[in-house]
Image (cartoon, grey):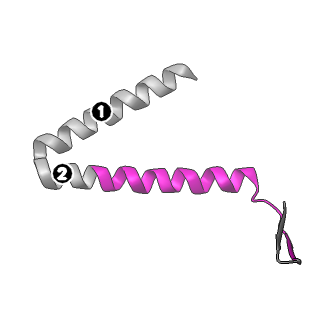
Amino acid sequence: MKIRFERNGTVFEYEHQPMKEGRFRALCALAGAAVYAGLVIGVAALCGGSGLLLALLGTVFVAAVVKGFE
């Protein structure tokens, strides 16, 4: 990837190799898991055990639907 920036007659160029696809997918999965864990913790804090049970059931349902599409 090449970045070129011109301003007032001065040119800045920077060349950078993009991240490998496998590493990008791993980082995205890790970030998604962190967001999901935060949401589950928030639901558990606000709703207690019943909210945690609903989050668990929702997780199982979504996992089953996603596995069905594969």
- SS at mark 1? helix
Three-letter amino acid code at disc 2? Ala
| Vertical order, 66 against 7 (above or below) | above
- Kindly give the residue lying farthest to the top in the view shown: 68
In magenta, the rendered stretch is 10-39
Kindly identify which numbered label has been placed on residue 24.
none
In the picture, which quadrant includes the C terminus? top right
- Contact, mark 1 vs mark 2 (Cβ under 8 Å): no
Q: Does the magenta stretch include residue 16?
A: yes
Instruction: Residue 10: give x, y in percent of width and height.
Output: 87, 79
Q: Which of marks 1 and 2 is nearer the N terminus?
A: 2
Q: Is residue 40 magenta?
A: no
Q: Locate residue 36 relative to residue 22 in the image: left or right.
A: left
Q: In which quarter of the image is residue 52?
A: top left
| Vertical order, 40 against 18 (above or below) | above
Q: Locate residue 20 relative to residue 55 in the image: left or right.
A: right
**Pointer 1: what residue?**
58
Instruction: Residue 64: give x, y in percent of width and height.
Output: 42, 25
- At x 47%, y 50%, the residue is 32
- At x 68%, y 56%, the residue is 23
**Pointer 2: what residue?**
44
